[in-house]
Amino acid sequence: MQKILVIDDEESIRELLKDFLETKGFKITLAADGESGLEYLKTDKFDLILLDLMMPGMSGLDVLRETTLKKINTPSIVITAHASVQTAVEAMKFGAFDYITKPFNLEKFYIAVKRALDVSTLQEENTSLKKELQKKYNFNKRALDRIIGNSVPIQNVIKFIDKIADTDSTVLITGESGTGKELVAKSIHYDSSRSKNAFIPLNCAAIPKDILESELFGHEKGAFTGAINTRIGRFELANNGTLFLDEIGELAPALQVKLLRVLQEQEFERVGGIKTIKVDVRIISATNKDLEKAVEDGTFREDLYYRLNVIPFQLPPLRAMKEDIPFMMEHFITHLSKRKGKEPPIISKDSMNCLVNYKWPGNVRELENLIERLLILKEGETVNPEDLPDRLVDKQPLGKGTMKGKVLSSDGIDLNIMLDEIENNMIIQALDLSKGVKSKAASLLGLNRTTLIEKMKKKAIHFNT
């Protein structure tokens, strides 16, 4: 049963509203003046306030001012026999939902009450949903609690988040695939003054190019075939919050121009629309591509790059944080076993050594996926090196003409997979030895530089020194 507080100094009006609204199924509380009305608001929660404007002592406007100061977000409808444009403006300025003059038609009055209660319900649902999302994704804590590890690179990430979270500057996060770029973007948002508003992610590479514009800016009904309703885009959804544009390097040139305009003007039009919509959105973008190279190649606009790259940050790969791997393992095992209702496996010392010494080309995402696999296959059991994928166990340096440690069993092998793993390991080792200098790495492998780069692209191997 929804609860309504009626504050009016006229007893006849209070009783009239009480009798009428109780027949509609509401629970009514009556207050004869502003002071007693505020006392009720301190001790109880209401879905709507019906408030007389002109009362002796504390007026209706005074009550509205107090509810605003005390951050009481209950919708209110002002009722008065002394209507004027000035008092209406004042009431709305202090948060009144609607303004009704005496005498009034009860059925029309009831429509206004229902409208205000619908808004109240939506506000409650919105607050509840935000709390659920924060609980689900554990973003009610600070970045220090969300990002696992004690290494210098991890501490640098945390310091970076703390330093720039409460600015409104655009941020460009770079790094290999799987390093946690979206996690850092969320941490920046939820540690900022925008945290009570929406964090809206969009992967520019995951959405077909012909509908990406509509995803970003929305569209009007009838804007194109299939546009049967008006749709709000990600920019509108992120208003007063943060828009995270992942894989920004995949954005088509035409959309780069439109994005640049929004960054400059903070306004846009929906697809098929003529109304200019103003927004206040912080942009955080991310990519595993070399955007400077893309600018040189002419595939990414230079002016957009400099707009996005106000605060750049490169995330370290997992292989640069080997001492954090045991902490991350423990975190993922605890989190995933609880979520899936399974007994956590025990990682043996030898297995942990294998995991720490592995290069992790897929970074943290690859580590999390491995833990999920082990949780299913080795629930409650000890994980030994033979339980791990071959690519993690084989630490034998592979030089010219050697395949020691590889024995063909009666079960056979998948030669293509094995050769692919060997090639991956050789490329990563060559890049390690050459400190990322591709021409030197290619020379170590007996390849030319362009062949090495093509292989790295095909295998999604990214190397940051």
Image: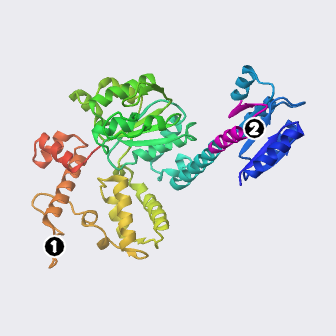
147 relative to 41 in the view: left or right: left
Question: x%, y% of residue 28?
Answer: 79, 49
Residues under numbered marks 2 and 1 in contact, where contact means CB atoms less than 8 Å apart: no
Q: Quick check: 427 left or right of 308?
A: left
Q: SS for tag 1? A: loop
Question: Where is the C terminus found, in terms of image quarters?
Answer: top left
Q: Is mark 2 on a helix, strand or loop?
A: loop
Magenta residues span 94-118
Instruction: Report the residue at 27% width, 33% height from top.
Output: 252
- Residue 374 lies, in percent from the top left, at 37, 69
The kind of residue tagged 2 is Lys
Q: Is residue 353 above or below residue 436?
A: below
Q: Residue beneath label 1, please?
A: 407
Q: Name the residue under label 2.
A: 70
Amino acid carrying mark 1 in the image: Val
Instruction: Say whether residue 117 is magenta.
Output: yes
State the quadrant of the N terminus.
bottom right
Q: Nearer the viewer, residue 113 or 191?
A: 113
| Mark in the foreground, 2 or 1 | 2
Q: Nearer the viewer, residue 66 or 22?
A: 22
How far apart are the alpha carbons under marks 2 and 1? 74 Å
